[in-house]
């Protein structure tokens, strides 16, 4: 239990199952349950947001599936993104009625959380006006996309910690001509996921509950 929110670590969970669990929590939060902060990872999967363009997949679907990468539709904003082991997923199931009831401000606060998280590891990142997510120079390191039902937000952040970056060659990440990077690539070694999780909890507590 965090400060006014519940923390759950789902470990490695298939994307479809994770989405089902998120939706169940959305209903509970709508009915008055506390906010939830979900931490997990997904097996390799491309998720197609509501704004996905036909040319965002760089290979035929059948070829992508042959390479062991699933393709799923996501009821969130944004274009296509990739989730895979080594990427820390954060799903805040937050009642925005208690956080300003302003979706744009909420998205900007998620970016602030992400920038401050990376500072803890000596990585200087920025948000980029007009391009949702967080960047180090011109390279993207964290993807952000949310869905909202009756002012309860779900979906969230994909943080490239030790992610296999070659998998991003399957797509135009978030529909952009952008290279992806990771904490491992920037720091030069594997980054312990447990350390990242601890800092995530600290940042969400500080930004949303202090």
Image (cartoon, grey):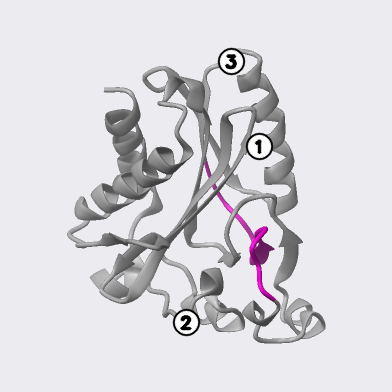
Q: Nearer the viewer, mark 3 or mark 2?
A: 2
Q: Nearer the viewer, residue 103 or 24?
A: 103
Rendered view: 177 above or below 126: below
C-alpha span from label 2 to label 1: 30 Å
Q: Nearer the viewer, residue 162 or 64?
A: 64
Residues drawn in magenta: 39-53
Left or right for 104, reference 119: right
Q: Nearer the viewer, mark 2 or mark 1?
A: 2
Quick check: is 72 in the magenta stretch?
A: no
Q: Nearer the viewer, residue 49 or 190?
A: 49
Q: Give the quarter of the figure containing the N terminus.
A: top left
Q: Quadrant of residue 83?
A: bottom right
Q: Secondary structure at mark 2?
A: loop
Quick check: is 41 in the magenta stretch?
A: yes
Left or right for 102, reference 24: left
Q: Residue furthest right?
A: 62
Question: Residue placed at 21% from the left, 62% from the top?
Answer: 123
Question: Residue placed at 66% from the left, 82% from the top?
Answer: 55
C-alpha span from label 3 to label 2: 40 Å
Q: Which label sits on residue 33?
A: 3
Residue 180: x %, y % from top left: 42, 75
C-alpha span from label 3 to label 1: 13 Å
Residue 193: x %, y % from top left: 40, 52
Q: Which label sits on residue 177?
A: 2
Q: Which label sits on residue 22?
A: 1
Q: Give the quarter of the figure containing the C terminus.
A: top left
> Does any portion of residue 136 appear in the rendered image?
yes
């Amino acid at each position: 239990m965090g400060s006014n929110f519940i923390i759950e670590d789902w470990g490695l969970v298939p994307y479809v199952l994770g989405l089902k669990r998120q939706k169940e929590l959305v209903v509970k939060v709508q009915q008055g349950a506390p906010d939830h902060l979900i931490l997990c990872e997904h097996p390799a999967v491309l998720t197609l947001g509501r704004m996905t363009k036909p040319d965002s997949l760089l290979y035929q679907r059948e070829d992508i599936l042959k390479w062991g990468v699933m393709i799923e539709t996501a009821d969130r904003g944004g274009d296509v993104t990739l989730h895979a082991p080594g990427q820390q997923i954060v799903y805040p199931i937050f009642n925005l009625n208690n956080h300003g009831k302003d979706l744009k401000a909420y998205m900007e606060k998620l970016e602030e959380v992400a920038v401050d998280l990376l500072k803890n590891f000596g990585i200087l990142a920025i948000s980029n006006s007009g391009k949702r997510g967080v960047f180090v120079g011109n390279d993207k390191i964290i993807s952000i996309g949310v869905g909202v039902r009756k002012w309860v937000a779900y979906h969230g952040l994909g943080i490239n910690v030790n992610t296999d970056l070659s998998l991003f060659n399957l797509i135009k990440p978030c529909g952009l001509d952008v290279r992806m990077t990771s904490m491992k690539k920037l720091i030069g070694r594997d980054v312990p996921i447990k350390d990242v999780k601890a800092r995530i909890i600290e940042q969400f507590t500080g930004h949303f509950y202090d």
